[in-house]
Image (cartoon, rainbow, N blue to C red):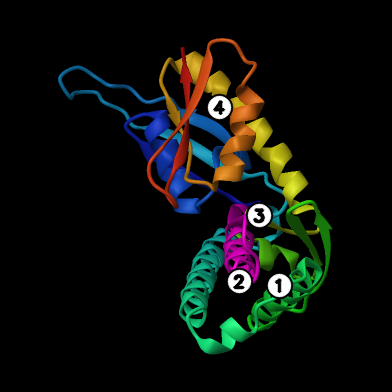
Amino acid sequence: MLKSRYDGQSVEQALQQGLKDLNVQENQVRIDVIKEGKKGIFGFMRQDALIELTIIDPELKKFDSLEALKQRNKQLNQEVNIIQNKETEIHTQEKSAEVENHKKSNLNDVAKDTLEYVLNVIRAMNIKVEGTYQIKSNTIYINMKSENASYIIGKRGQILNALQIVGQNYMHQFVKGYYTLILDIESYREKRKETLEQLAVNMSKKAIQTKKPIKLEPMPNFERKIMHQALSNIENIETYSEGREPHRYLVIKNK
């Protein structure tokens, strides 16, 4: 079983240390408090809190050891950096005459070309993948299939989101006006939506109990919007975003 113990001056401090070490969210682990911890008097008789974190997320439980999980997180971060570097290359290519001559006038051609571009980026990572596209109004939906879907999705969708940005920037070379690209694989977006909605509810309860604002990790605008909507009708709770993109995060606060 994937589990590890952490100590700290308080249960919350031990928890945050454990989440950072494992690079996971609170809803991906089971928290068992071994010792609550004591503040002591003037520093005497102080006792640290001790907790045990057990991985419960089905995707993360596939790893053989905690070390494998941590190494995987490092690999995912490296892949995100590779994709972001690829995005920079695209901006350079936009200025070239070759790209200028490659302009598309038909949205169907744009969708097809964008699909092939995204698939080629993934295949360059030595991952086999196939995909199809649909056009609804001003949105192009790309749905993919792969035996290595988890590698394409990445930790909490980081790689998939980075690929979506790359694909959208590529698409915008050929179309004017407001057009959106939605990249998905194995129905991940719907599953992620359910996870975010549940996380929003759980964190709102925590905000009410502790009377303190809960700051979540940075996430894309469309994911923050899902959480805003999930909590919009809950009494005594307000939500707002802080920070600058791409490090903007959601805050859940008890009124």
- The answer to whether marks 3 and 4 mark residues whose Cβ atoms lie closer than 8 Å is no
Task: List the residue tagged with mark 1.
Answer: 114
Q: Splitting the image into 4 quarters, where does residue 135 fall? A: bottom right
Query: From what the image shows, is residue 127 above or below residue 65?
Result: below
Q: Looking at the magenta stretch, what is its main secondary structure?
A: helix
Foreground: disc 4 or disc 1: 1
Q: Which mark is residue 170?
A: 2
Q: Could you tell me which residue is drawn at 55 percent across and 44 percent down?
A: 221
Q: Which residues are magenta?
A: 155-177
Say which label, 2 or 3, has the lower sequence index: 3
Three-letter amino acid code at the position of disc 4: Met
Closer to the camera, 157 or 166?
A: 166
- The answer to whether marks 4 and 1 mark residues whose Cβ atoms lie closer than 8 Å is no
Q: Does dot 3 land on a helix, a strand or a loop?
A: helix
Say which label, 3 or 4, has the lower sequence index: 3
Q: Does dot 2 land on a helix, a strand or a loop?
A: helix
Q: Describe residue 2's horizontal placement relative to residue 13 as left or right.
A: right
Foreground: disc 1 or disc 3: 1
Q: Splitting the image into 4 quarters, where does residue 39 fall? A: top left
> Spatial distance from mark 1 to mark 2, Cα to Cα?
7 Å
In x, y percent, where is residue 105? 73, 72
Q: Could you tell me which residue is drawn at 50 percent across and 25 percent down?
A: 239
In x, y percent, where is residue 134? 84, 60
Task: List the residue tagged with mark 4.
Answer: 203
Three-letter amino acid code at the position of disc 2: Tyr
Query: From what the image shows, is residue 212 above or below residue 191?
Result: above
> Spatial distance from mark 4 to mark 2, Cα to Cα?
36 Å
Task: List the residue tagged with mark 3.
Answer: 60
